Amino acid sequence: MKTYVVENGVQASETIRNLEVQGFTKDDIYLFAHDTTRSEHLTENTDTNNIGLKEEGLFDKMANAFSSRGDELRARMTSLGVPETEAMRLEEELDEGKVVIVTQ
């Protein structure tokens, strides 16, 4: 698992293309943005994964329904294996409008 922080969608697309050249598939790449609309838009445009029930687990999914967006993003990152302290740092990057990419 590796994480990348980029400034915008253009850099996210470039990073994802580079990851694919390295052998990663779209199924191994997850993209995060703080704003839900931006996250959905970037995920669609880069054809990357959205965290679903399989990765997150039913209990965590239910708990996230009652959490703030920051809590939800940290929980989703940790469900992919990102350590809690790293997820907190990455969520701060998201607060600043950056995009986070996680590979598995």
Image (cartoon, grey):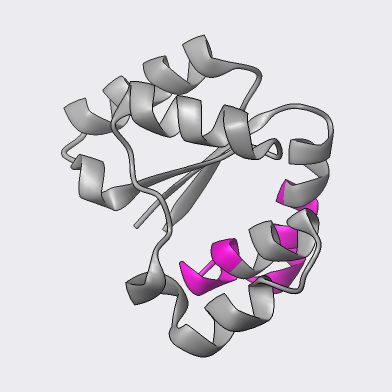
Residue 65 lies left or right of residue 91; in this view the side is left
Q: Is residue 83 above or below residue 15?
A: below
Q: Tell me the quarter of the picture where residue 64 sits.
A: bottom right
Residue 37: horizontal and vertical position, in percent? Answer: 60, 32
Residue 2 lies left or right of residue 72; in this view the side is left
Residue 14: horizontal and vertical position, in percent? Answer: 39, 15
Residue 7 located within the stretch drawn in magenta: no
- Which is nearer the eye, 20 or 95? 95
Residue 82 located within the stretch drawn in magenta: yes
Q: Tell me the quarter of the picture where residue 23 sits.
A: top left
Examine the rendering and report whether any part of residue 52 can be seen. Answer: yes
Q: Tell me the quarter of the picture where residue 63 sits.
A: bottom right
Q: Is residue 87 above or below residue 13?
A: below
Q: Residue at x 70, y 28 (%)?
A: 98
Please identify the quadrant where the C terminus is shown: bottom left
Q: Residue at x 28, y 31 (%)?
A: 47
Residue 26: horizontal and vertical position, in percent? Answer: 23, 41
Residue 78 lies left or right of residue 84; in this view the side is left
Please identify the quadrant where the N terminus is shown: bottom left
**Which secondary structure is most common in the magenta stretch?**
helix
Q: Is residue 39 above or below residue 74?
A: above
Residue 15: horizontal and vertical position, in percent? Answer: 41, 23
Q: Residue at x 52, y 16 (%)?
A: 9
Give, as a single range, the part of the protein colored magenta.
76-90
Judged from this view, the residue extending furthest toward the top is 10
Q: Residue at x 77, y 38 (%)?
A: 93
Residue 40 lies left or right of residue 25; in this view the side is right
